[in-house]
Image (cartoon, rainbow, N blue to C red):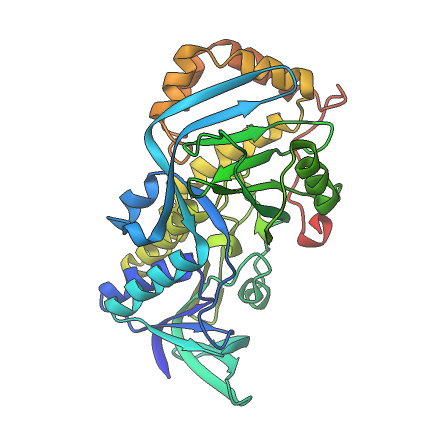
């Protein structure tokens, strides 16, 4: 088949790119290796930016809304009341919603097509698949979008460096008696994890408790100890490998005359402070669509998103150097004015307003400067380089 754009991977970012391209009249097909659209269930918390990107999010796709973000350490706690609520969505339902939008715009979806590779072709790139019957199928496309996740085969075939990855694990639980379902809670404990634990309500009586792991941690054992500590009984588990952004990533390449652009987890379009990539993945997908439709540089179209993700990378670098006493100090700097700021501006729009936060609380500048000069053990350290997937596993 001859296509303008072949999209590999039935992810939210892949479907959103397909929708944008199809609405502009492009011949677009999404190829998915699974026999049907059956993404794993996962509870996600996203900012109101999702509604601004999509135009609207139907109530059927929203499980719940969160109005208060509460953060705690062993010695301090602080809460932020959100001006606009965060949305709790279920990943499988959300992906199906985006698939329907893409198809309504004119994109096609081919299930049971496993990507095998690609090579130069006079009309762009020849993309090879193993079809549902086990035969080789070929699509000729002038552009290829890799939306096939953190271990992207498209990236491998195009010689594009893949992002580092970390595991996340969530346990579905009943909310504790008296828990306000409008409150999401985050706990920092640098002795156990360089990230954090969370409790995200997804209804009036249920939620998920989880954490992010890394190559130094036993994520299942850490989560079980946390569940036991607070008396949570797991009803089911949700897990995934999630990409991590790094400023050095270049999620684009070329095969023959065909441009190859990565989106979503394949591109590392994930905020490494929260390991959230739903909104930033759609943002990157929109940038890829614009680059293909306008014939512009993907790097230029990605610039606003990259600024946002680079800022989160820098913040993560500093957070990784905090011990528990440092987290207590950080929360002590979250004054009522800082709380108002964080309630007004969400985490997907920090790059354009971060300077206002530093003016609001100058002690944050001093804390950040001191952390830049040392690591968690007090030693001077250079910013880390790009971590390979093998190193992160």
- Please tell me which residue lies in front, 289 or 238: 238
Q: Residue at x 49, y 76 (%)?
A: 120
Query: Where's residue 159, x and y in %?
Result: 58, 63
Q: How many marks?
A: 0
Quadrant containing the N terminus in the rendered view: bottom left
- Give the answer, above or below, for where 24 lies relative to 339: below
Q: Residue at x 62, y 21 (%)?
A: 73
The answer to whether one can see residue 263 in this image is: no
Q: Residue at x 45, y 15 (%)?
A: 358
The answer to whether one can see residue 235 in this image is: yes
- Give the answer, above or below, for where 149 lies relative to 360: below
Query: Where's residue 336, x and y in %?
Result: 41, 11
Which image quarter: residue 75? top right
- Please tell me which residue lies in front, 288 or 377: 377
Residue lying furthest front: 177
Query: Where's residue 41, x and y in %?
Result: 50, 57
Residue 196 lies left or right of residue 58; in this view the side is right
Query: Where's residue 124, x and y in %?
Result: 41, 74
- Give the answer, above or below, for where 121 lies relative to 341: below
- Please tell me which residue lies in front, 66 or 322: 66
Which image quarter: residue 217? top right
Q: Residue at x 62, y 47 (%)?
A: 234
Residue 354 lies left or right of residue 316; in this view the side is left
């Amino acid at each position: 088949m001859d296509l303008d754009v072949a999209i590999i991977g039935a992810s939210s970012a892949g479907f959103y790119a397909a929708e944008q391209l199809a609405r502009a009249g492009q011949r677009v097909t999404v190829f998915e290796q699974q026999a049907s659209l059956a993404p794993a269930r996962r509870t996600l918390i996203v900012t109101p930016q999702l509604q601004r990107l999509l135009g609207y999010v139907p109530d059927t796709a929203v499980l719940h809304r969160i109005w208060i973000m509460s953060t705690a350490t062993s010695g301090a706690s602080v809460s932020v009341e959100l001006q606009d609520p965060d949305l709790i969505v279920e990943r499988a339902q959300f992906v199906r919603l985006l698939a329907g939008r893409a198809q309504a715009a004119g994109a096609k979806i081919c299930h049971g097509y496993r990507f095998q590779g690609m090579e130069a072709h006079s009309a762009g790139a020849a993309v090879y698949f193993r079809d549902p019957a086990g035969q080789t199928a070929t699509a000729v496309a002038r552009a290829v979008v890799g939306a096939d996740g953190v271990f992207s085969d498209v990236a491998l075939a195009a010689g594009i460096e893949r992002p580092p990855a970390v595991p996340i694990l969530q346990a579905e639980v009943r909310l504790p008696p008296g828990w306000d379902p409008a409150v999401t809670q985050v706990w920092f404990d640098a002795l156990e994890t360089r990230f954090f634990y969370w409790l995200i309500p997804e209804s009036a009586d249920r939620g998920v408790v989880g954490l992010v792991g890394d190559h130094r941690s036993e994520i299942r054992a850490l989560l079980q100890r946390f569940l036991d500590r607070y008396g949570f009984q797991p009803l089911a588990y949700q897990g995934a490998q999630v990409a991590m952004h790094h400023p050095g990533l270049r999620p684009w390449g070329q095969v023959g005359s065909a441009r190859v652009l990565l989106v979503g987890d394949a591109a590392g379009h994930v905020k490494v402070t929260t390991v959230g990539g739903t909104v930033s993945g759609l943002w990157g997908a929109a940038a890829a669509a614009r680059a293909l439709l306008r014939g512009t540089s993907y790097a230029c179209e990605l610039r606003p998103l990259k600024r946002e993700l680079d800022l989160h990378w820098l913040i993560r670098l500093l957070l990784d150097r905090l011990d528990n006493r440092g987290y207590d100090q950080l929360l002590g700097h979250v004054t009522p004015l800082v709380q108002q700021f964080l309630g007004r501006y969400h985490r997907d729009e920090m790059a354009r307003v971060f300077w206002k936060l530093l003016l609001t609380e100058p002690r944050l500048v001093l804390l950040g400067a001191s952390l830049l000069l040392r690591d968690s053990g007090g030693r001077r350290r250079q910013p880390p380089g790009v971590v390979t997937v093998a190193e992160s596993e």
